[in-house]
Image (cartoon, helix red, strand yellow):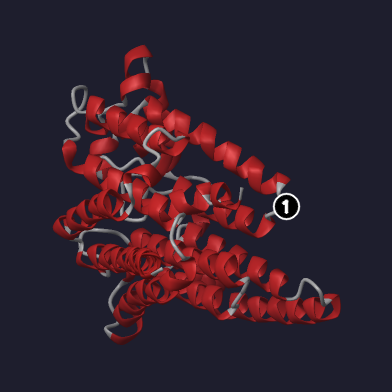
């Protein structure tokens, strides 16, 4: 009996440890983004690998499960990519770390991670808010060497991750979180972040009042009036401060077109070195599309991922998990117009929300 109690205590302690350790990794990733530190990114990736190796018994690791085979395939393709491009090995370890961190999150006690998720969110939001509203920095100067688009990206991804976590863990839909995100996105003057943040606020709003149609109509009317007032007061400033006036006329379309024009039989499987493409040197090799960047780094592995992504979307629709479905769609929309994920700091968020349905089956 004593042996059984000791075994149970050890199991509980290990479960608690891995949950809190996972949360600590979220903090590290948030800090690595703020500090713009590759060293902290690598440390968090190494710790994710060690957490997987040491915190799960061999019999529970499921090395030959579909998820592990997928992870292995992406890493192999990332390594093969090194022989055909000059990308370097720097992205392979962070990719592995993000994949395993997502895997671990789907296996731990989500309630024990909550405070860590909130703290990681607050670190990012506080840093951007302090830079904008206290230091009065121009939006393009918040992240050294990065544009305001990255700040908007960070706001959207951490906001959606916190909303996702609160939904799957507590079935809560706090409006204050997307409202803060919308205010910050407005101040950053980024088109995609502003549109996604506005849509996110509406989605959370509707889920808060899904059982009260009258309240939904009243609050939605108030929301429209406020938006109209803000448009009258700040509309011209918004158009001048962003690229809204240009509409769909953006270099992104040209960059994407150039990438697809240069795909051949070999690099379809291996990926393309972006720095060898015309026009890309003007944008620092940035395709402004996370999925194109992913293909440039893992080749055919990205095609497999996109296939699995659509399976996940289908699973959420069939299961009528529409809230998670819309969160995933908004994440994808934001990722589609910039290349800050899929071998980036926020990969684990995208992987977690994409494959969360696995945990519910």
- Graded by Cα atoms within 10 Å as few (under 14), some (14 to 19) or many (20 or more), the crowding at tag 1 reads few
Across and down, in percent, residue 211 comes to: 81, 74
Q: Is residue 168 left or right of residue 321?
A: left
Q: Nearer the viewer, residue 288 or 10?
A: 10
Across and down, in percent, residue 40 comes to: 18, 60
**SS class, disc 1:** loop
Find residue 215 and report its image quarter: bottom right
Across and down, in percent, residue 249 comes to: 49, 45
Q: Is residue 198 above or below residue 305?
A: below
Q: Is residue 225 left or right of residue 14?
A: right
Q: Is residue 65 above or below residue 80?
A: below
Residue at x 46% of width, y 57% of height: 243
Residue 278 visible in the displayed image: no
Determine the residue located farthest toward the top in the rendered image.
Answer: 265
Q: Is residue 281 left or right of residue 222?
A: left
Across and down, in percent, residue 22 comes to: 34, 63
Residue at x 72% of width, y 44% of height: 318
Q: Is residue 170 above or below residue 310?
A: below
Give the mark count.
1
Residue at x 29% of width, y 63% of height: 25
Q: Quadrant of the N terminus?
A: bottom left
Mark 1, residue position: 320
């Amino acid at each position: 009996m004593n042996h059984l109690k000791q075994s149970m205590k050890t199991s509980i302690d290990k479960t608690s440890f891995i949950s809190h350790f996972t949360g600590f990794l979220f903090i590290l990733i948030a800090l690595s983004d703020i500090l713009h530190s590759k060293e902290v990114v690598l440390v968090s990736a190494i710790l994710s690998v060690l957490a997987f190796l040491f915190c799960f018994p061999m019999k529970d690791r499921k090395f030959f499960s579909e998820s592990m085979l997928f992870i292995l395939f992406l890493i192999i393709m990332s390594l093969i990519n090194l022989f055909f491009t000059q990308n370097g090995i720097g992205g392979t370890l962070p990719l592995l770390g993000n994949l395993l961190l997502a895997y671990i999150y789907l296996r731990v006690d989500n309630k024990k991670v909550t405070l860590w998720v909130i703290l990681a969110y607050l670190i990012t939001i506080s840093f951007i808010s302090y830079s904008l509203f206290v230091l009065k920095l121009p939006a393009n100067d918040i992240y050294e060497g990065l544009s305001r688009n990255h700040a908007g990206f960070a706001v959207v991804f951490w906001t959606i991750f916190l909303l996702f976590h609160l939904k799957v863990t507590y079935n809560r839909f706090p409006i204050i979180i997307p409202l803060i995100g919308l205010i910050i996105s407005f101040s950053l003057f980024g088109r995609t972040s502003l549109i996604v943040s506005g849509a996110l606020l509406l989605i959370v709003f509707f889920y808060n009042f899904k059982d009260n149609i009258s309240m939904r109509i009243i609050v939605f009317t108030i929301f429209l009036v406020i938006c109209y007032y803000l448009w009258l007061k700040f509309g011209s400033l918004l158009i001048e401060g962003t690229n809204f006036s240009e509409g769909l006329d953006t270099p992104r379309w040209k960059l994407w077109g150039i990438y697809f024009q240069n795909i051949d039989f070999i690099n379809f499987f291996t990926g393309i070195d972006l720095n060898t493409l015309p026009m890309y040197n003007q944008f620092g090799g940035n395709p402004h599309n996370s999925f194109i960047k992913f293909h440039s780094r893992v080749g055919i592995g990205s095609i497999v991922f996109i296939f699995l992504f659509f399976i996940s979307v289908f699973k959420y629709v069939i299961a009528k998990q529409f809230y998670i479905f819309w969160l995933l769609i908004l994440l994808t929309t934001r990722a589609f117009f910039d290349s800050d994920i899929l071998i980036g700091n926020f990969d684990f968020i995208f992987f977690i929300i994409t494959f969360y349905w696995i945990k519910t089956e």
